[in-house]
Amino acid sequence: MEKGLKIFSYLPNPRVWKAEIAAKIAGIPVEVIGDKPAEIPNWLWDFEPKKLSDSDKEDLKQFERTGKRGFSSALYKTDDFIKLIPFGTVPAAFSPDGKIGIFESNSILRAIARQDNTNNLYGKDNFEASRVDSFLDSGLVFSREHQEYLFGLKDMNEALYQRMKSAYEFFLNGIEESLKSTKFIGFDHLTIIDISFFCDFSQFLREGHYEDDLKEKGFTLVSENFVSDYPKTYDHLMKLSKVEEFSSVIGTYLDWYKRKLQDSS
């Protein structure tokens, strides 16, 4: 069976970076196609995605669908896309032959790890793989809540803020505890747990760009005391950010955060 994945998404997208980082480590080919979020409505969502002109949109009117989850305008999704990706979301991944659709970033990440035979990214055996799944599943609440939180930063309310704070504390308490006994999260070797954590938490730290908006509403950054409250987790995040397979994918995404820490020290 041919190895690899094709991924369609808005870009840049830390959730896509999960698969890209794992693919670099494992030497698995991945093709990523997409555009800025504002331009994604101008694309045909399909195994063979393409940018659409106004005349294309008229010709493909039968594929026009109401945008949801962050997209307010109409989106053009083929019937085959919906068949393969029933929830109609991105990132959307496909097997090289286009016959299998995979959705949700951690599932796409797992699809890469399952093709890796040398790096133990998904653990060394079935029991370790189940432990990997335990950590990934434990992060689902944090992942879901931080998406809603980031969307609502400019119009924050107490209920949303408290949900995020609770998810943040639960997630990081577990990560911090794990790192007290292992070099990486859950193990003494790198796995997709570390990759998923790194990408999700790096995206969450974007809340720092809206610190003034939060203050106007009477809130502080949820991550305000991250470095002091979770020192091992912070050190792990910084360590991973320096690994070539990570840094070559995320580029300068975390530079603003590192500068902020330097300025405040």
Image (tube, rainbow, N blue to C red):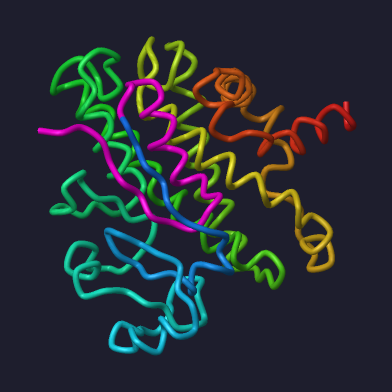
Q: Does the magenta stretch include residue 102?
A: no
Q: Report how many numbered discs are placed on residues in the image.
A: 0
Q: Position of residue 195 (x, y in %)?
A: 44, 30
Is 156 on the left-hand or right-hand side of 8?
A: right
Q: Nearer the viewer, residue 97 or 235?
A: 97
Q: Position of residue 133 (x, y in %)?
A: 26, 35
Q: Residue at x 44, y 45 (%)?
A: 16
Tell which of 61 and 245 is nearer to you.
61
What residue lies at 37% left-to-right and 42% top-to-bottom? Answer: 31
Please, which residue is most extreme toward the left here?
A: 1
Q: In which quarter of the image is the N terminus?
A: top left
Picture coordinates of residue 233, whole percent (x, y): 57, 25
What residue is drawn where x is 46% and y is 56%?
A: 34
Quarter of the image holding residue 68?
bottom left
Q: What stretch is highlighted in magenta?
A: 1-28
Q: Could you say which is closer to the camera, residue 182 or residue 20? A: 20
Q: Is residue 11 magenta?
A: yes
Work out whether 238 lies above or below 152. Answer: above
